[in-house]
Amino acid sequence: MWSASYLAKIFPIFRKTAAMKTTISTFLVTLLLISCSDEKNTTNSLTTWQHYLGDPERSHYSTLSKIDTSNVGKLQLAWTYNSGGLETGRTTQIQTNPLIVAGTLYGVNPAIELFALNAETGKELWKYVPSDKDNTGLGLNRGLSYWESNTSEEDSRLFFASGFRLYAVSAKTGKAIVDFGENGSVDLRDGLGRDKEKMAVYANTPGAIFENTIIMGTRVGEGPGSSPGHIRAYNVITGAIEWIFHTIPQPGEFGYDTWPKEAYKTVGGANSWSGNAVDLERGIVYFPTGSAAFDWYGGDRHGENLFANSLLALDARTGERLWHFQFVKHDMWDRDLPAPPNLFEMKRDGEKIPAVAQVTKSGHVFVFNRVTGAPLFPIENKSYPASSLTGELAHPTQPLPTKPLPFARQQLTENDLYDPNRPAFVDDFVDKDQNIDPPTVLEKLQSVTSEGQFVPIDTTGTILYPGADGGAEWGGAALDPTNGVMYVNSNEMAWIVRMKEVNGSVEANSHPGEALTQIQCARCHGGELQGLAGIPELQTVKNRIGLDSIASIIKNGKGAMPGMPNLSETVINAISHYIAGMELEIDHRAEKSTIKVPYAVAGFGRFKDDRGFPVVKPPWGTLNAIDLNSGEYVWKVPLGHEEKLNDPEIPVSGTENYGGPVITAGGVLFIAATNDEKIRAFELKTGKQLWEDQLPAGGYATPATYEVNGQQYLVIACGGGKMGTKSGDEYRAYALPKN
């Protein structure tokens, strides 16, 4: 696209007065409208937000510029929509980045019900509730996939997942596409090569649309016996599986020798839950993957474990592997790749290089040639110590990029502590301390291992920094396609992880379900089942629900918790009795064969002080601008503020944050994400904050921006429910005053 300065050279009339800027803008808009007139062949038009995170490249970028740095401070509320789906006494979330096509906004509420709104007024047009929906295993929804036919103007489809199923719904009417799959949906457990009744498979993040297929990654469990995370392409018309890529390779496939011989039959995980990106021109789809299960101990999966923790470049038509890069070999730290990659054109030595950038939980950015897979900045293989856990074989080296420098701190030392003499908030990050007086933050740090990245977890406690949620998290990064600058928000929270030996070490008079509960439940609910931030405690659940309900939730899941149908009835019975506080007369030693690993998580969670503040010096959350052409930082600023801090030397503390940014041609970055429940606007060039507004509940989602009838809007889902904040169901849109 021609710049205003270039137009001024070839059209002298544009140079006469400053007032002609409006004429130039109008001319540019006209050119853009012409170039984007065939919406099927563009990745991002002026008026729509047709793809998850803005476009198939997942740039989070919009060409809209009516809201700019000069007027963004005048934004005001345009409309609100209460989507429903809240449930008294239950924590829910909305992490949805909505779609906006032809003046209609499509979103999902906390109960995973699909709706359509008039994007100008917020008036509901229709709502779709899956006919076989129940209240178990709903999980979360981060967005939708939109497809439209090249032959029929009336055939446009929305795809979204709820429970085990992927649904196809008419974008026009909100009715199920009954010819798709079985009466409008397909079972995501089909085609994985194992007993579907013993698998839990969900899809939090939308699939990649390429031609007439939707290519899906999935969310699976992270404990022993979880489902495999194979990637599949479905025909958007029929629902039939077009191809499958085995992320845990089978005999004869590349990478099979990086696992034990029988691993493909039993090991789970290595799934792509965080999203994808598509190079439409070249027909390449990029999927980042997570760790293999069990994600904290790999004694039953010796080897590098391809294609866990990898970026996969696949032929979008066939599923053939074109190239891959593995970020963590034999993961034991739950270092899933947390967000979709970003596709962009790197400028180097006067040339443009097709590139892909991937952010990580550890706070790094890896950049590759997206056609060949060649690294575009040097990567070093660093040596790390062996594991002290019996049967565990840690990989001796791990790759880290030399550039850009990490956007999150890498090692927690005594000098990094904010207030070392305050009591450590032990209940939030590790099993209950038996001392009358809790240790200080400094004492707790001195009692555990803190040596940076890829130090194996042990039974005394190891600092994971950045924590299990990042660094970068599922909100991902924005990448300006006009200049190659990445904008990524980051958490600065240390976690403590501690393992416990459980196979054969349970006391003879202990409850039969204790060891099994430690293996299956402590990963999410804490070593003493005390709950972690946003995840409920199980110590008093027996006072709220009965034995049968506990057993049903374990098997089928509920809310964001995936079910564990892979567990035998005997194991489920033992765990449910233990959680319910009821005796069970069976010999737990007979169940040793069901314990697939000799270790469980004893402590797992955020390292805080007694006020609930992170133990590290602020900032606790940051927003970073990185020029990926050079690998150098443009700016870094705190993101969010903890009002209770009350420290005059720290005017902006930063906070934990979940959800990504949106950037625009108007020079503005929009982001909510923070636990102070605000939405903010920043200047792209400098990082200066230009505007903020208080939300009714936390905006732990990525916003979207679009235009209707000449008016630009910004919309955010206010679902709350994370980091101990209240849940909500509101979508709200902002715009400039019409006058």
Image: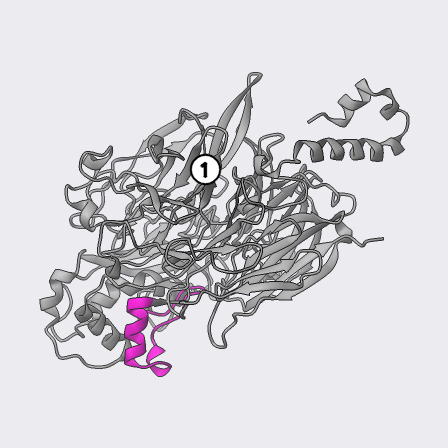
Residue 166: quadrant of the picture: bottom left
Examine the rendered structure and indicate whether residue 698 appears above or below residue 586: above
* Viewer can see residue 447: no
Number of residue marks: 1
Examine the rendered structure and indicate whether residue 36 appears above or below residue 509: above
Residue 25 lies in the magenta stretch: no
The residue that appears at 29% across and 57% down in the rendered structure is: 498
Q: Which residue of the protein is positioned furthest toward the top in this rendering?
A: 350
Disc 1 marks which residue?
Answer: 358
The x and y percentages for residue 442 are 41, 56
The residue that appears at 29% across and 44% down in the rendered structure is: 331
* Color style of the picture: one colour
* Viewer can see residue 396: yes
* Front residue of 357 and 605: 357
Identify the secondary structure beneath mark 1.
strand
Residue 310: quadrant of the picture: top left
The x and y percentages for residue 124 are 63, 64
The x and y percentages for residue 361 are 43, 45
> As drawn, is 168 to the left or to the right of 10?
left
Point out the image quarter for the N terminus. top right
The residue that appears at 58% across and 45% down in the rendered structure is: 153
* Front residue of 326 and 385: 326
The x and y percentages for residue 139 are 41, 61
> As drawn, is 483 to the left or to the right of 519?
right
* Front residue of 303 and 16: 16
Q: What residue type is labelled 1?
A: Gln
> As drawn, is 213 to the left or to the right of 256?
right
The residue that appears at 47% across and 66% down in the rendered structure is: 610
Magenta segment boundaries in residue numbering: 528-556
Residue 541 lies in the magenta stretch: yes
Q: Callout 1: 10 Å neighbours few (<14), some, many (20+)?
A: many
